[in-house]
Image (tube, rainbow, N blue to C red):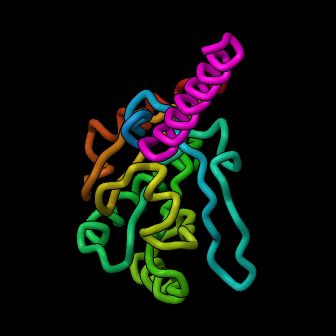
Amino acid sequence: MTARKQFTVVVLLVGLVLVVLAAGKTLLRNELAPVGIGAEAPDFAAKTLGDSPSENTLDDYRGQVLMINLWATWCAPCRIEMPSIEQLHKDFSAKGLKVIAISVDDPGADSTVLSFAKHFRLTFEILRDPKGQLGEISRDYQTTGYPETVIVGRDGIIRKKLLGAHDWNSAENRALIERLLAEKAE
């Protein structure tokens, strides 16, 4: 085999390896980069509710302590958890906590989501994943069930990630929020 043929074979093999690595990174993204405590919060694009919906992304909340709650109106544990999230919002929003609840209800369920919010007297921001539970937000946050909540520090790093309904007024959860709010923005 001539040097030129050897060089061509090597270039083709290196190219093939790069293609396999790129495909593996794309297909195995969740396994290679788990979204958990210490990871950077993934970006998202969620819609506001109402007559003229707009799109909100993670960048809209940069520099704030952020509670992201992924939920659905059909989720019984979500119903249990909502009152404690509302109380946490009332107690800490003036101090800088930004609570957003991203509904993963099916597309077109805006009226159902709004009725849910009205029933529970929710005053924090409610957004919707435009593709529902099969959308990118659940995938990118590696959601394994609902509700799932992520607490993000001002630095954009996930500080807590919990699956299931939780008492957000517990001493432990309130202490975490207070500690994060005391941190200075970078």
* Magenta-tinted stretch: 1-29
Choose top left, top right, bottom left or bottom right for residue 86: bottom left
114 or 104: nearer the eye?
Answer: 104
Q: Is residue 57 left or right of residue 150?
A: right
Q: Decide: is 33 above or below 45.
A: above
Q: Residue at x 71, y 16 (%)?
A: 4
Q: Residue at x 69, y 46 (%)?
A: 59
Q: Residue at x 59, y 48 (%)?
A: 94
Residue 45: x and y in percent read: 63, 59
- Which quadrant: the N terminus? top right
Q: Magenta span: helix, strand or loop, mainly?
A: helix
Residue 73: x and y in percent read: 37, 78
Q: Decide: is 73 above or below 108.
A: above
Q: Is residue 110 left or right of residue 116?
A: right
- Which quadrant: the C terminus? top right
Residue 81: x and y in percent read: 30, 63
Q: Is residue 142 left or right of residue 108?
A: left
